Image: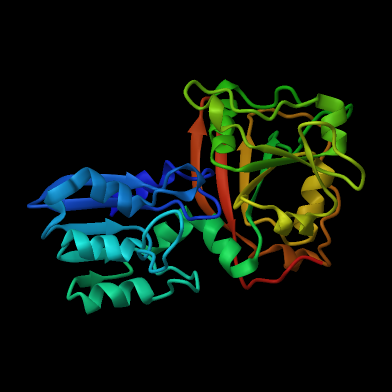
């Protein structure tokens, strides 16, 4: 299942509105098929893995990060039917599919065909890996990640707005990898006017994965950009399950105040600025309300900098 989860990450940011699933088929202790959801959502991971495994699928075990789909589509057959036809003997599933067209139907079809089924293996990791799809299903909007580059004293820029560069090259390369994992990237009009950011992916082999560019504004967006009038406007985006917010502080504060940030990506540089720009008011009524909102998921060194990833604690007090 670990290999299937890793394969599914290859499709993150490219499969919407479908989930980024990974699949591995094992026969006699050897991997005979690998697959992950392809750009645009088809073919599905199971279809890719079965095609690679061929006749070796018969009697094999399939590991998949999401319940195989049970609905027919003009773009391809149901994966549950493909697994039955291939003759696999066992299917191990990380997470059930909340899509009403499947939601238990895939598992039922496998069981009806007398295929052994095991579920909830590394489910939390699968939930995190497919958070964009799952969030869209549950909340009707994309998963939102807020990226901030900070000094040790919490500044995002100098007093005059200068922010190039707070972090070093390793942290900036990591940020470009994060861009490649999102369908869309968003900044405010102030950031666009001040920095004219390209917001593309400048990593070898990933330049073709630059995300759609969004601007938070009540006015019109320039050519090549799409205007979002307010944070709630993200829900109307088509083919977008992951949005990365890159600037500036007013835009960040607007999404935090609306409680629409699911993930924080903080890059901390070992520098002190003093008197620099920081986040404005995010709608907290008092200091106790700030606690219990965020859970640290990951932290690591990137050159001289440090990246910390926090996830929103669901069910805690919401922003004002």
Left/right placement of residue 78 relative to residue 192 reads: left
Q: How many marks?
A: 0
Residue 95 vertical placement versus 103 (above, below):
above
Q: How is the image coloured?
A: rainbow
Q: Nearer the viewer, residue 221 or 262?
A: 221
Across and down, in percent, residue 17 comes to 55, 54
For the point 33% across and 69% down, which residue is it? 120
The answer to which image quadrant residue 283 occupies is: bottom right
Residue 203 vertical placement versus 298 (above, below):
above
Left/right placement of residue 292 relative to residue 27 reads: right
For the point 43% across and 74% down, which residue is it? 103
Which quarter shows the N terminus?
bottom left
Which quarter shows the C terminus?
bottom right
Which residue lies most toward the right here?
Answer: 219
Across and down, in percent, residue 265 comes to 61, 44
Q: Nearer the viewer, residue 263 or 239?
A: 239
Across and down, in percent, residue 88 comes to 17, 61
For the point 18% across and 65% down, which residue is it? 90
Would residue 276 be seen by someone viewing this image from the given angle?
Answer: no
Across and down, in percent, residue 150 comes to 70, 36
């Amino acid at each position: 299942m670990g290999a299937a989860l890793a394969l599914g990450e290859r499709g993150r940011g490219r499969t919407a509105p479908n989930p980024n699933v990974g699949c591995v088929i094992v026969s006699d202790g050897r991997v005979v098929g690998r697959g992950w959801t392809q750009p645009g959502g088809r073919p599905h991971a199971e279809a890719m893995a079965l095609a690679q495994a061929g006749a070796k699928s018969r009697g094999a075990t399939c590991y998949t990060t999401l319940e195989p789909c049970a609905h027919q589509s003009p773009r391809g057959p149901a994966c549950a039917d493909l697994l039955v036809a291939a003759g696999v003997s066992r299917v191990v599933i990380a997470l059930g599919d909340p899509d009403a067209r499947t939601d238990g139907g895939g598992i039922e079809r496998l069981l009806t065909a007398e295929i052994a089924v095991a579920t909830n293996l590394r489910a939390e990791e699968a939930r995190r890996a497919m958070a964009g799809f799952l969030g869209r299903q549950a909340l009707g909007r994309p998963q939102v990640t807020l990226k901030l580059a900070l000094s040790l004293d919490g500044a995002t820029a100098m007093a005059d707005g200068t922010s190039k560069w707070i972090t070093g090259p390793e942290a900036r390369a990591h940020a470009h990898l994060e861009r490649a994992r999102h369908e869309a990237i968003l900044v405010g009009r102030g950031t666009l006017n001040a920095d004219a950011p390209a917001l593309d992916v400048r990593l070898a082999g990933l330049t073709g994965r630059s995300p759609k560019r969004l601007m938070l504004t009540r006015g019109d967006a320039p050519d090549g950009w799409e205007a979002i009038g307010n944070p709630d406007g993200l829900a109307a985006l088509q083919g977008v399950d992951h949005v990365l917010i890159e600037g500036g502080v007013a835009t960040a504060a607007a999404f935090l105040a609306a409680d629409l940030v699911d993930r924080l990506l903080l890059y901390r540089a070992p520098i002190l600025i003093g008197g620099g720009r920081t986040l404005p008011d995010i709608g907290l009524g008092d200091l106790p309300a700030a606690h219990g909102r965020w859970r640290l998921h990951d932290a690591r060194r990137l050159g001289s900098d440090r990246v910390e990833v926090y996830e929103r604690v669901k069910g805690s007090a919401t922003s004002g």
